[in-house]
């Protein structure tokens, strides 16, 4: 597990209890979404207290919060581990996620203004520049996840649907978590880049049906790839059948 940044560690012991718990939560969440943790990996409370320079209480509060969100499993008298999600559950999640994000992207295509389009094109240019500088596949790079959030966050602003955005925040994290468990890191493959190009074109054209369809098809395909990778990894860890 990576050590806590010096700027965070230096102030951790001085923070009030609520702030220490939030700091522990953000640190652990970042480790789960962008760090080296994989399915079933153990989380040591003792190691975390040392990394965060705090007592067990904020660490346990953070772990309980993450357990409630479905990222870790806490077994009394045994310990805490990163979840190993059921493949069927992952497939179901991405079907729901695809429907939700598809609807939001359709809203964006129908509601965007000329000013919105200027902002959207600027964000797309920023994403393209970031992708050009990102590491190649096989070298985990958190910038892919951050660029993806930048892209979809802009779409949500164009959609002007606060309730959809509120629901989507948790779904984005769950999607990124499953992708990371399956592949180690988010990466924009050619298929993903083509899907994003179709989404961009539909928003610029003001075509909500095409925007919704492109997003839904894209995320359903992501879900199938993630589920297949998780299933393969589980078979590999289990070894050949008798």
Image (spheres, helix red, strand yellow):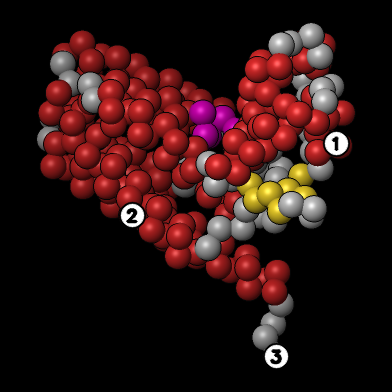
Instruction: Give the alpha-carbon distance from disc 2 to disc 3, as whole Å.
Output: 34 Å
Query: Which label number is shown at residue 47?
Result: 1
Question: Closer to the N terminus: mark 2 or mark 3?
Answer: 2
Q: Is residue 117 magenta?
A: no
Q: Residue at x 67, y 86 (%)?
A: 241
Looking at the picture, does residue 104 appear above or below residue 186? above
- Give the x, y percent position of residue 132: 51, 30
Name the foreground residue: 181 vs 163: 163
Q: Which residues are magenta?
A: 141-146
Name the foreground residue: 192 vs 45: 45
Question: Closer to the N terminus: mark 1 or mark 3?
Answer: 1
Residue 189 lies left or right of residue 29; in this view the side is left
**Disc 2 target residue:** 95
**Disc 3 target residue:** 242
| Extreme residue in the front direction | 76
- Give the x, y percent position of residue 217: 28, 52
Look at the image and tell me in which quarter the C terminus lies: bottom right
Q: Residue 171 lies in what quarter of the image?
A: top left
Looking at the picture, does residue 8 appear above or below residue 148? above
Looking at the picture, does residue 166 appear above or below residue 227? above
Instruction: Give the alpha-carbon distance from disc 1 to disc 2, as whole Å.
Output: 37 Å
């Amino acid at each position: 597990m990576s050590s806590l940044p010096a700027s965070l560690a230096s102030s951790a012991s001085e923070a009030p209890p609520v702030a220490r718990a939030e700091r522990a939560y953000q640190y652990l969440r970042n480790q789960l979404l962008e760090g080296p943790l994989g399915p079933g990996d153990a989380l040591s409370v003792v190691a975390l207290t040392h990394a965060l320079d705090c007592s067990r209480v904020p660490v346990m509060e953070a772990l309980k919060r993450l357990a409630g969100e479905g990222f870790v499993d806490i077994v009394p008298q045994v310990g805490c581990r990163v979840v190993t999600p059921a493949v069927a559950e992952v497939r179901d999640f991405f079907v729901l996620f695809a429907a939700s994000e598809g609807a939001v992207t359709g809203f964006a295509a129908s509601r965007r203004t000329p000013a919105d389009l200027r902002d959207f094109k600027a964000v797309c240019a920023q994403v393209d520049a970031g992708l050009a500088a990102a590491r190649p596949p096989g070298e985990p790079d958190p910038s892919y996840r951050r660029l993806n959030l930048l892209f979809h966050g802009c779409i949500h602003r164009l959609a002007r649907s606060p309730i959809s955005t509120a629901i989507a925040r948790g779904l984005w994290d769950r999607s990124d978590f499953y992708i990371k468990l399956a592949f180690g890191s988010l990466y924009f493959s050619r298929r993903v880049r083509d899907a994003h190009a179709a989404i961009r074109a539909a928003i610029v054209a003001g075509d909500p049906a095409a925007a919704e369809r492109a997003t839904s098809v894209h995320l359903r395909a992501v879900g199938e790839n993630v589920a297949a990778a998780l299933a393969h990894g589980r078979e590999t860890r289990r070894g050949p059948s008798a």
